[in-house]
Amino acid sequence: MPTYQRGTMKRLEIACAILICAALLFLSRAHLSRQQPTGAAPPLASPPKNIVLIVIDTLRADHLQTYGYARDTAPFLEEISSRGVVFEKVFSTSSWIAPATASLFTALYPSQHGVITGHNATRKLRKKFSHIVLNRIPDQLETLPELLGKAGYSTFGISDNFKVFRKMGFGDGFERLDSAWYRGGDEVNAIATRWKEDLLVADRYFLYLHYVDPHQPYHKREPWFEAAQGQPASTIARYDSEISYVDGMIRKLFDEFQWQDDTLLIVTSDHGEGFLDHGNWGHDKTLFTEVLHIPLIVYHPSLKPARLKGHASILNIYPTLRELLGGSGENDLEGVSLLPAPRGVHALPGSRALFAELIKRKEETNRSVRSVLEGKWNFIEQSRQDSQVAGFLFDLKADSREQRNHGALFPQIVASLRKKNRTGPRDTLAVGPEAITLPIDEEKLKRLRSLGYV
């Protein structure tokens, strides 16, 4: 081959190699851009015009198709999930509404904000007392509605669970809060619609909606109810139909208010529910993952779809919104922001210990349950009136349904987590408790019975 031809061929080989490298680099970057991140929530360009926070009472994450459930119980939430950010492993701070919702509103644990008791009146208490003492959110804590009000949002709230009411501090910061005894999702939507004009004339608004329908009593919601035989299948069928019912309620408001245009929508729960997973019905007796693992779905038209796999908490919502609105990143809350920041990326706090607390007053029972989740381990410790303590260690990676107690196999891990569990959240952030006193009457007891609390 002549010399000039050999030179030409060499130049062609080099050019082809450059083109191949460029193509591989392009394909690699395209693949990476399609990969769903596992670290931090993608940022918004600016604070959203409106913020809507929806809490679906007693919704365990694993009963949504988004979290792997076989039934499509919530097609609208599935649609929103495909267009938004899904946090796969989010945990509550307690297994019942008052302490968990107070944590949502303050980014502190129950032992820090002090809301550890609520309307859980019992027949035993009724015989001993003519009143009940309820904890409330301390006045010195700034709640989420107060934070958003100071940021210029008009603040509205509708709670269909009577435990979220003004006297317990949940109304602080709300210009308008409607709280009542379980009326159903239709009535929640009806109230929101009656407020529509006031919401839309606001420069920007924050709307908190608390649907209680998946809570006991479980109704057969048509056309979603699918009959099943035996227990717990028949009860679960009712529960699932309630989820579908609420999903439809959320879709109606989403379309009516056109939240797809300029609204940050956050959907979560206060806690889950037990269906004999560990021998118990309900949620206010244990801290297994069926009552702690909750959904967290975030939608805004400017957000890119993502699924974040690290551990997070209901505590993270408040500081994330605070940073989004340009607030301080000071270490004055137990929760941390999930937003990327100029100073670096906030990784989901999988390496941080997450606590959950179920604390009972002595006049009710000395029994308490505490858990600490760190890495793949969840350690649950139960104390009883006879001063006996039972500990359970679960490997959530290998045993997500917590069927095997690994405590005897890993005594060093048990010792380490037990120490953290008993030390608990930071004492320096504790400000509670404060209390209010309410009379116990037959009407209250009747309503408590209807929700399974008596």
Image (tube, rainbow, N blue to C red):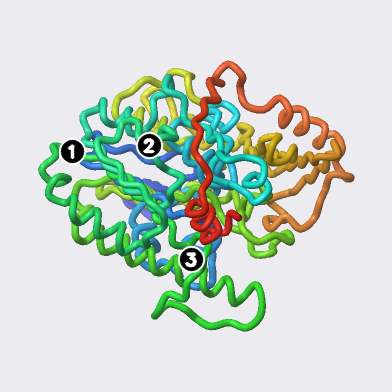
Q: Is residue 369 left or right of residue 16?
A: right
Q: Residue at x 72, y 32 (%)?
A: 421
User: 23 or 221: nearer the eye?
Assistant: 221
Vertical placement of residue 373 versus 281, above or below: above
Crowd class of label 2 (few under 14; some 14 to 19; many from 20; radius 10 Å): some
Q: Residue 235: image x %, image y %?
A: 58, 72
Vertical placement of residue 117 versus 89, above or below: above
Q: Is residue 5 visible?
A: yes
Quadrant where the N terminus is found in the figure: bottom left
Q: Give the labeled residue for mark 3.
A: 65
Q: Residue at x 49, y 38 (%)?
A: 438
Residue at disc 2, secondary structure: helix
Q: Is residue 248 left or right of residue 59?
A: left
User: 342 or 252: nearer the eye?
Assistant: 252
Q: Give the labeled residue for mark 2.
A: 166
- The amino acid type, in three-letter code, at marker 2 is Arg
Going from the N terminus, do you reach mark 3 or mark 2 first? 3
